[in-house]
Image: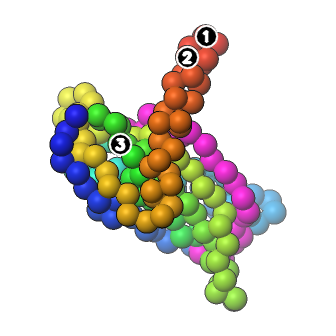
Amino acid sequence: MNKEQLPAGVSRTIQSRLVLPPDTNHMGTIFGGTVLAYIDEIAAIAAMKHSRRAVVTASIDNVNFLSSAKVGDILILEGVVISTGRTSMEVYVKAECQHIESGTRSLTTTSILTMVAVDAEGRPTPVASVVPETDNEKRLFENAQERKDRRMIANEYAKELC
């Protein structure tokens, strides 16, 4: 395992996006697929900042759509590396909706993705370990092995389906 350690803050990435009509359904709320694309992008950026390498998405463990954003709202996404393996990084992403008129924010989506650092030939390459900083990062870090075990079981089940 790579001995280098980096604080989680190195990877922290924040993006703001305006919810526009082409991004929404007939009810004027943002498509889940659009939010997923934003989540995948910010997770990749956070993982690249941590690993200083290109990355690929290995899994999206869960996505929780808690509320929606409407046309004209601002979607604020934050991604941070919360745990690492030899070549993989778990990235926690949350999306909040800021309502223009009131300025209030509400949590819309949370997700955990696994990204893998790759070299120029596309082969997995080692990454530094992460040191959680906030209470939430520490809590997520402590539960990383449980999530990894669930991923391994899900991967085996998926192989059985083929």
Q: Could you tell me how far apart the alpha carbons at marks 2 and 3 are, in whole angstroms? A: 21 Å
Disc ID at residue 160: 1
Residue type pointed to by label 1: Glu
Q: Residue at x 33, y 64 (%)?
A: 9
Chain-order first, disc 2 or disc 3: 3
Check disc 2 and report the residue beneath it: 156
Residue 139: in sight, yes or no?
A: yes
Helix, strand or loop for disc 2: helix
Question: Image point 25% across, 28% down: which residue?
Answer: 123
Quadrant location, the N terminus? top left
The x, y position of residue 106, in whole percent, is: 67, 72
The image shows residue 95 at horizontal and vertical percentages of 58, 63
- Which residue is at 53% across, 37% downward? 147
Q: Is residue 33 above or below residue 21?
A: above
Helix, strand or loop status at disc 1? helix
For residue 67, above or below residue 90: below
Residue 147 counted in the magenta span: no
Of 126 and 38, which appears nearest the observer?
126
Label 3 – label 1 distance at C-alpha: 27 Å
Evaluate if marks 1 and 2 touch, with contact meaning CB atoms under 8 Å apart: yes
**Tag 2: amino acid:** Glu
Residue at the image point whose x is 54% and y is 70% from the top: 76
Q: Which mark is residue 103?
A: none
Which of marks 1 and 3 precedes in the sequence? 3
User: Which residue is label 3 attached to?
Assistant: 84
Magenta-highlighted residues: 56-74
Tell me if I can see residue 42 in this picture: no
- Residue type pointed to by label 3: Thr
